[in-house]
Each structure stands twice: as C-alpha cells, then as structure tokens.
Image (cartoon, grey):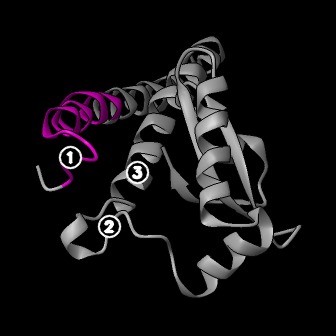
Amino acid sequence: GALEPAISGEIMRLHHQKHHATYVAKYNKALEQLDAAVAKGDASAVVQLQGAIKFNGGGHVNHSIFWMNLKPISEGGGEPPHGKLGWAIDEDFGSFEALVKKMNAEGAALQGSGWVWLALDKEAKKLSVETTANQDPLVTKGASLVPLLGI
C-alpha cells in the first residue's frame, strides 16, 4: 500500500474493509432500530440501543478521523508538522519528538483497545494528548476537545 513501510497494506485493508465497514453497518442498523423504538414509544429499547450507538458511531467517527490524517511519504506523510501546528507542538510539548514519545507511552498504557488523540483544547487554548477506551470518541472526554490526530 501507499503507506508502507510505516503501515502495511494488509492492516489498512483490514481496518477499512472490515472494522470501519462493520462499525458503519452496525451504527446504521442501530439508528434504524432507534427510530422504530421511538415510534413505538419503547423506552426500554431506546436505552438498550445507546451502547451500540456509542460504540459503533464512535468507531465510525474515530476511523473517519484516522483516514483523514494519513498521507503517503511521497506526499509529505511522516514529516513533522510545520507552521502553526508545529509551533504549538513545540510550545506545549517541547518538541515533536517529545509529543511522539508521549503519544507512544499513552498508547502503551491503554488496557485493551482504544485510541490516543492529539487534541486542541479550545478552552485551555493548548494542545493535549488524551486517550479513550474502545471506540469512545474524543468528545466523551470533553466538549472543548477537538481531535487533530487519532491513532
């Protein structure tokens, strides 16, 4: 694939064709079931569907952000960011290398599955590294957090 050797084509196909596609299909199914439950006034079913909506909707959102962050080396992928983002990384983490080290450490500390995020905290006006469990989207950690990179 275009991202090799950093990420194998096999891994990318698995995440796109299996994982992400499954999240989208299950999210759409849960939304259809939610519409039917609301139309029937079935509050119990509405409550039971919340977990599936959060998990599969989060999986869809998280993977969509992930795809938008990818760029082949031939198009500048893998290079440290420049401009305002590069300056903000230096200001908030000391260096790009320090940010990478922090994200790697946070990812290694995750138990089970989850995501590591580089986020802009709009309230604090600075970058932060956050983690979410499973397919929880970053917004579950705070409404002021804007995802910039998710891995």
What secondary structure is found at the residue carrying circle 2?
A: loop
What secondary structure is found at the residue carrying circle 3?
A: helix
Nearest to the eye among marks 3 and 1: give it: 1
Which of the marked residues, 2 or 1, is nearer the chain's N terminus? 1
Q: Which residue is mark 1?
A: 5
Q: Which residue is mark 3?
A: 66
Which amino acid type is shown beneath numbered disc 3? Phe
- Asked if the residue under mark 1 is in contact with the one under mark 3, i.e. CB atoms within 8 Å, the reply is no
Specify start and end residues of the magenta stretch as a single range: 3-23
Which of the marked residues, 3 or 1, is nearer the chain's N terminus? 1
Tell me if I can see residue 64 in this picture: yes
Instruction: Using the image, tell me which numbered label, if any, was put on residue 119.
Output: none
Q: Is residue 21 magenta?
A: yes
- Asked if the residue under mark 1 is in contact with the one under mark 2, i.e. CB atoms within 8 Å, the reply is no
**Where 2 sits versus 36, above or below?**
below
Q: Is residue 10 left or right of residue 46?
A: left
**Where 110 sits versus 100, above or below?**
above
Tell me if I can see residue 137 in this picture: no
Say which quarter of the image contains residue 68.
bottom left
Percent position of residue 75, x then y = 23, 75
For the residue pair 112 and 20, the one nearer the viewer reads as 112
Residue shown at the point (30%, 36%) measured from the top left: 20
Instruction: Using the image, tell me which numbered label, if any, was put on residue 77.
Output: 2
Residue shown at the point (68%, 45%) measured from the top left: 102
